Amino acid sequence: MLAKVLSSAVIGIDAFLVEVEVDIVPGLPNFTTVGLPEASVKESKERVKSAVKNSGYTFPDDRITVNLAPAHIKKEGTGFDLPIALGILCATGTIPRQSLSDFLFLGELSLDGRIKPVTGSLPMALAAKQAGYRGIMVPCPNGKEASVVKGLHVYAAQSLAQAVEFLRGEQILLAQNPATDELLQAASGSVEDFAEVKGQEHVKRAMEIAAAGAHNLLMVGPPGAGKTMLARRLPSILPPLTFEEAIETTKIYSVVGMLHKDQALVTERQFRAPHHTISDAGLIGGGALPRPGEVSLAHNGVLFLDELPEYKKHVIEVLRQPLEDQCVTISRAVTSITFPSSFMLVAAMNPCPCGYATDAGHQCRCTSSQIQRYRSKISGPLMDRIDIHVEVPAVSYSELATLPAVGESRAIRERVIHARQLQSQRFKQDRIYCNAQMGNRQIRTHCALSSETDAMLQAAAEKFGLSVRAIFRILKMARTIADLDREQNISANHLAEAIQYRIPS
């Protein structure tokens, strides 16, 4: 007897459909799995056999062949346990064939028949929706995650016996349907506030501009000036995720298994701060079976690199492509996988090895060659991809004694959200979300300069030797500053402020 059950697997962060074919013929007892299965898939025969028997069903003492099609793509993970078990039960007549035709199934089986969670259920649910299937059956812990896909019936089963009874019409499972709009509106937001940072008003202004246009930012200052404190409060002024951005981010966290238990959706922009000992594979992704790295985990959020020169040079140099293309492509002998990586880079560093070259209150003991060697750890091409360079001076005691401005982040965030709404309207036909993502065509259209401002930019380019990339990034920043001022045209003041942020200290 032959039975077919639909399942799914993941390549990168996107899923593809897998047809699980189960053929049972008379012969010596044998269980063979073909279709390029990895070790965890081959081991499923032992889990399936025990789960079927311990759930009260008869496991056939015949020759069983399981084919995972398409057979030319490697299959990994434990999510094929449930479809294989259902296929065996269908081939033996326990489950009617027609009940399997409209659903996609995934789940790991324990030896007693319980269905355990798997990774990647959201992209698999999206694949089922795009293929036109009516519903999907997932483990209970994955139910909320898969159910954010609108227009797809999601059924969460606790055990193999419950799944079989549902397919036989003996038990009712209610389709899960969370209110995704309410989930986004209920996002708690950051509990940290810019009001807790005393002084540093010009740095707060730079961070407001960075947040409004998703521009990259570098802070340079002595130890204890508040660089890390400022960076960790950046999420408090970022605009909320749109539903499309939330889906993109959740897909990444679903694939790597980092969603919290019963979490349906990633509703807040992520703040990733990897340690400076991280490897290049940890930063951009990789491995024998490539997995997303920190730049992808920071997708639609913030990647914070503290003490930037302490990172290995070859590690931070791999950031060039993600910063330019908003994606990472990892090539292996048998496949090439692209992960999204549209993030804001926020970096912090000291001005010299001892940290006090720009601090009037401390004496710097570094030689000019030591300072040069320290700063040369960050290459020119990487620095050229950072839009805003801002100096963070030490804070005086008088500034520390000032009373905090309660709710400062809330006021800044309102201005940032308004600026992002202008950009969303501006780029609604271009499939981009912010000024930092503008290409050459959008820059020519939306960053037009008057003769006065054009002359100012030309003079700055000649005086400071700005590259073409730096000029374009100045125009993007000027557009963002104009959006914050709710101005349609870029004025001389907007351009001057943008130029000021591009000149390294």
Image: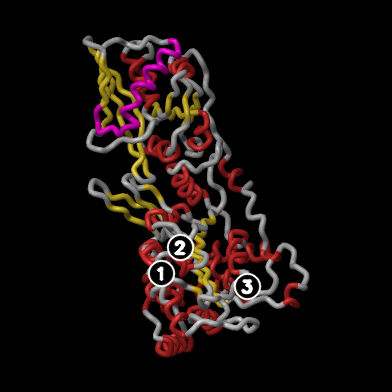
- Residue 38: within the magenta? yes
> Is 291 left, or right, of 70 in this rendering?
right
- Asked if one can make out residue 75 in the rendered structure from this viewpoint, the answer is yes
Determine the CA span between mark 2 and mark 1.
9 Å
The residue pinned by badge 3 equals 225
Residue 417 in sight here: no
For the record, the magenta segment spans 34-56
Q: Are marks 2 and 1 in contact (CB under 8 Å)?
A: yes
Q: Residues within 10 Å of mark 1 (few under 14, many from 20)?
A: some
Cα separation, mark 1 vs mark 3, equals 38 Å
Tell me residue 48's x, y (percent). Answer: 38, 20
Q: Amino acid at mark 1?
A: Gln
Q: Is residue 125 above or below residue 267?
A: above
The mark that comes first in sequence, 1 or 3, is 3
- State the image coordinates of residue 496 (x, y, percent, origin top left): 53, 83
| Residue shown at 34% from the left, 10% from the top | 93
For disc 1, the marked residue is 442
The amino acid type found where label 3 is placed reads Ala
Q: Amino acid at mark 2?
A: Phe
- Residue 147, magenta (yes or no): no
* In front of the other: 255 or 493: 255
Residue 227 in the image: above or below residue 242: below
Quadrant assignment for the N terminus: top left
Closer to the eye: label 2 or 3: 3
On the image, which quarter does residue 211 sit in? bottom right
Left or right? Give the position of 224 relative to 103.
right
Q: CA distance from mark 2 to mark 3?
A: 38 Å
Looking at the rendered structure, the secondary structure element under dot 3 is: loop
How many marks on residues? Answer: 3
Q: Please report whichever mark, 2 or 3, sits nearer to the chain's N-terminal start.
A: 3
